[in-house]
Image (spheres, rainbow, N blue to C red):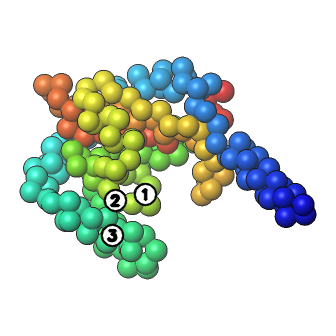
Amino acid sequence: MKINKIYAAIFSIFFMTLTINTVSAGEFDAKISAYADEIHVWLSDPVIIDAVVAQNTANENLSQGDIDALDKKWRAESSASDQPFINELLGRYISTFLKSKEYAAGGLITEIFVMDNKGLNVGQSQITSDYWQGDEGKWQNTYKNGAGAIDISDVELDESTQTYQSQLSLSVVDASGKAIGAITIGLNVEMLQ
């Protein structure tokens, strides 16, 4: 009897934590979608397109094993003091461009990263926890669905920034309208209200 009460209490605490830390993006969908229109204005900038095209060409022969090895290297460096792989990516012109867009948003944008046609990061405003996004909805629901695809994540508490954020992901397309990659923008939903 006592054990059942303990399990019930644990379950209640667990459920309340989930309810507090994850909110459906539904109530913010309209505002997030409207913000997507603003993103499209700078998404076609040659800085983004050229960087994605160059990486797609450079990485066209990578196997899944190669991708896994790069992701493993990234994850190892993210907790190390020496970060040459991460620093090279953060030092790219596209990363500087993305950092300027994040800064100009005045706290509304919490992160931005652009991915190639394999789901590998091309540039980013902040260090991501992993290098390969190809196994995640943000890439699969956008790049794989072609031009005009959009993915809006649920709202979650971001532990590092202590803000409630949703990730807006869009396809990156070239001048012909073909999807060549994807972009994810973390949005502080409290600033959308």
75 left or right of 27 in image: left
Answer with the quarter of the image where residue 46 lies: top left
| Residue 13 visible in the picture | no
What amino acid is at disc 3?
Lys
73 left or right of 37 in image: left
Residue tagged 3: 72
What amino acid is at disc 1?
Thr
Residue tagged 1: 128
Question: Compared with residue 66, is residue 134 higher up or lower down, i.e. above or below?
Answer: above
- Residue 131 got which mark? 2
- Which residue occupies the extreme front position in the image? 1
- CA–CA distance between discs 3 and 2? 8 Å
Q: Earlier in the sequence, mark 3 or mark 1?
A: 3
What amino acid is at disc 2?
Tyr
Evaluate if marks 3 and 1 touch, with contact meaning CB atoms under 8 Å apart: no
| Residue 135 visible in the picture | yes
* Mark 1 element type: loop
Q: Point out the frontmost of discs 3 and 1.
A: 3
